[in-house]
Amino acid sequence: MSSLERRTGIALWRQIADDIRAAIGNGAYEDTGKLPTEAALATQFGVNRHTVRAALAALARDGMIDTTQGRGSFVVARKRLSYPIGPRTRFSAGLEGQVARTRSRGLESRIEPASAPVAEALHLAPDAPVLRLDMLGEADGTPLSRATHWFEATRFAHLPDHYRAFGSITRALAACGVEDYVRLFTDITAAPASAADRQDLDLEPGAVVLLTLSVNGEVGGGPVQYSRSRFAADRVTLSVRMPGEI
Amino acid sequence: MSSLERRTGIALWRQIADDIRAAIGNGAYEDTGKLPTEAALATQFGVNRHTVRAALAALARDGMIDTTQGRGSFVVARKRLSYPIGPRTRFSAGLEGQVARTRSRGLESRIEPASAPVAEALHLAPDAPVLRLDMLGEADGTPLSRATHWFEATRFAHLPDHYRAFGSITRALAACGVEDYVRLFTDITAAPASAADRQDLDLEPGAVVLLTLSVNGEVGGGPVQYSRSRFAADRVTLSVRMPGEI
DNA sequence: TAGCATTTGTGCGTATGTATA
DNA sequence: TTATACATACGCACAAATGCT
């Protein structure tokens, strides 16, 4: 049934842990919150009980479950933050009410020649100079997202200064003459976290990141900002809500 | 720099493979398409060349790169399918023009009591009977998504029959009196593929799935369909486009 | 054509991690 | 806990293919 595979570079105990994680996410143990016994899980997965124990230990380390001798293992409820994606997507405003404190921290800013996708998204000539901003988004001290933003370099030359002054991209853009902007599109996919992701977002190997490509544009104008973001998938869901119409 | 960790249940070669995959996705080797030599990668990651070779072999198996003795490893361009998410999200229509043939296959249908989230989404009493439909979405013979849909059971009692007749949920809903429907919201996150995912979607361990929760509703009416979908993340990007307004 | 540097492919011995009984 | 088997990772050495002079 639940075919585990060997020689894949993923230890069996970790495959089992991922499986139980998915089952919890599907609401499998919703009624009592109690997982099957280790012996039952060992039978279910067709492995030794030691292997199941390694999986449960990993889940307990992650705070997903709580295990007590003589009682069993119980699911610890933990919700993902909901990050809204819509025409008015903004980092801090979107998380209001869910966490006490959000922070978006600038890591680095520099001018570089536009790569092909950046030039295309911003309607620039290839290799045109663009301003690149690297940022880290945090909620209550936990890193949520790592984003790289690109802007046309001449018009937004002083954006980093404004950003340092205001601590907000929205306000920094306003200082550069962008009164209002909207999200034009967002492409979303996912992949295993790279070593850089793990370092930036404080993730463990085997963690998953949500990757988004997005473009913001001026209302009634052209594209202004091209962004690539990487979200810690076990901490957020991207919530897409359609405007008007409904 | 690129801190690999041991004893995490993820083999080093797989961590390295994920890393290179991410680098390719970031356009790191875009100019020539050539990866650094095995020796250079071994130095970069601080591992033995054999370990790098195991990572490259995995990427080659996946068709990400192409390796030739004496020349090196080269990135094979391969694009993800783009699955549009908007007010009019439909499976087959969305993939038109990208693939020759799409198919959505019904796996199972049965009546069950509504779980809490299902009841809430469909505005039903808890444990009210709901119709559950399990489906597999394929493009050119490759599985793309595994979805479970729930409908109110009495109104949509004959939906499975209509679906078998038409081969389309949209038409089956029309036969049940739902003239038109729109996507009300979509929540997106991601996680490692479970054993069931791997079997349904033909994935390897360590693969990643995009998870969506969505609700469709009648135009000017209430919710009709609650869905949980699991997409093979390395085969699709979810493309969110805002309607009108822009 | 021959020679050379570069790069991938292969073999073997050993140590450690993972999984079973 | 112990013993055993297999997978993973390392180090060293050398073979084979490619591209260049």
Image: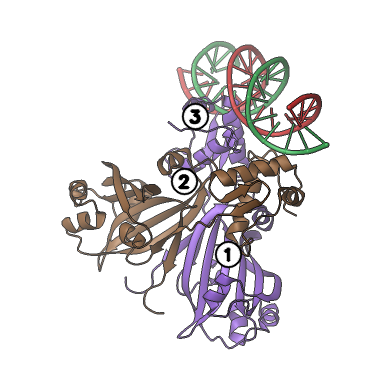
Chain colours: A brown, B purple, C green, D red
| Picture residue at 53% right of the left edge, 36% below the top | B16
- State the residue in front, A55 or A63: A63
Q: Residues within 10 Å of mark 3 (few under 14, many from 20)?
A: some
Chain containing the residue with disc 1: B
Q: Residues within 10 Å of mark 1 (few under 14, many from 20)?
A: many
Chain containing the residue with disc 3: B
- Residue type at tag 1: Ser
Mark nearer the N terminus (2 vs 1): 2
The residue labelled by disc 1 is B229
Residue B161, position in %: x, y?
A: 70, 81
Q: Residue B45 got which mark?
A: 3
Quarter-of-image position of residue A1 = bottom right
The residue labelled by disc 2 is B25
A28 relative to A152, above or below: below
Residue B98, position in %: x, y?
A: 53, 62
Residues behind callouts 2 and 3 on a single chain: yes
**How many angstroms separate mark 2 from mark 1 (CA)?**
24 Å
Q: Residues within 10 Å of mark 2 (few under 14, many from 20)?
A: few
- The reply to whether dot 3 and dot 1 touch (C-beta < 8 Å) is no
A157 relative to B124, above or below: above
Residues behind callouts 2 and 1 on a single chain: yes
- State the residue in front, B84 or A109: A109
* Residue A74 appearing in the image: yes
- Residue type at tag 2: Gly
Quarter-of-image position of residue A30 = bottom right
Residues behind callouts 3 and 1 on a single chain: yes
| Picture residue at 51% right of the left edge, 73% below the top | B215
